[in-house]
Every structure is written in C-alpha cells, then in structure tokens.
Amino acid sequence: MEPTIFSASPFLPLVGWSVVLLVAHILLQGMTATKELGTEWNAGPRDEGLKPRGALAGRAERASANFRETYPAFIALALALAFKGDHAGGGDAGWGLYGAWLWFACRIIYIPLYLAGIPYIRSLVWIGSLAGLALMFAAVIW
C-alpha cells in the first residue's frame, strides 16, 4: 500500500490525543455530576432537568463546554495542515505544529486551573490556547 500524505503527518497523533482529552472532559463532567446527583440520576433519562449545583461539578461542566468551543477549530486546522503540510522554515514541521502543541498543552493545563477556581492564570492559559490556534491558522493560509 502506497503511503499517503496523511500517513506521515505529525498532526494525526495530536488529533488522536485530542480525542482522549475530549473523553477526559466528558468523564470528568459525568463523574462530578454523578457524585453530586447519584447513580440513579446518571442511569436514568434525566427528564426532571436536574443540574449539579456544586462548585466542582459546575466547573467541570463549564471547562468541558469551554474546551468544546475551540475543539472544532483545532480539528479543522490540524486536518488542513495534515493535508497541506507544515514545512515552514525547511524542517519537518513549522509554526502550525508548534501551535497545535501549544493548544493541546494549554487545554490540558486549563483543566486543573479551572477545577481549582484559579482566576487570571487560567485566562492566560486560555489565551495561550487561542495563540496556538492562531499559529495553526497562519500556517494554513501562508
């Protein structure tokens, strides 16, 4: 079988790991809500519209929602760069890959900062994740 343009892309493992991060968000949100509302609520149809009221479960839900706001952009940019290539500067990878790693690292760091309720630093980390997306975008268009 002939190798394709995607077979050697350094973006594809990051896309895979980003799915692991998405699942971690989902599990964290579910576990904190279940701890508060109980397994019966979790296993049921949730018709009553109950929402967790505790700080940790609320933060886990908001952190997950925040992740999902930038996740489609990351996937789109990573796949665009996997298709286009990212060889700015003559090496195997350019600024797009650095941006992808920056986004990924910031999204990991963001979770404990949000759960702990740490302001300002959390916002700086979020800005760092946007900077990563901006680097990826720049690599796509140039």
Image (spheres, helix red, strand yellow):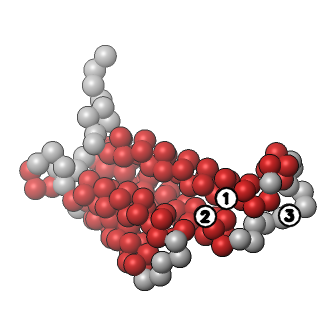
What residue is shown at x 90% (from left), y 61% (from top)?
A: 48
What residue is shown at x 44% (from left), y 49% (from top)?
A: 18
Residue behind mark 1: 32
Secondary element under disc 2, as helix, strand or loop, is helix
Q: How far apart are marks 1 and 2 (CA)?
A: 7 Å
Split into 4 quadrants, where in the image is the C terminus?
Answer: bottom left
Q: How far apart are marks 2 and 3 (CA)?
A: 18 Å
Residue behind mark 2: 60
Q: In this view, does 25 lie to the left or right of 6?
A: right
Q: Is residue 47 left or right of residue 138?
A: right
Which dot, 3 or 1, sits closer to the camera?
1
Q: What residue type is labelled 1?
A: Thr
- Above-or-below relation of 124 to 81: below
Disc nearer the start of the sequence (2/3): 3
What residue is shown at x 36% (from left), y 41% (from top)?
A: 12
Labels 2 and 3 touching (C-beta < 8 A): no
Secondary element under disc 3, as helix, strand or loop, is loop
Q: Position of residue 120 (x, y in %)?
A: 43, 83
Q: Which mark is residue 8?
A: none
Q: Residue 49 carries which label?
A: 3
Tell me, yes or no, if residue 32 can be seen here. Answer: yes
Q: What residue type is labelled 2?
A: Ala
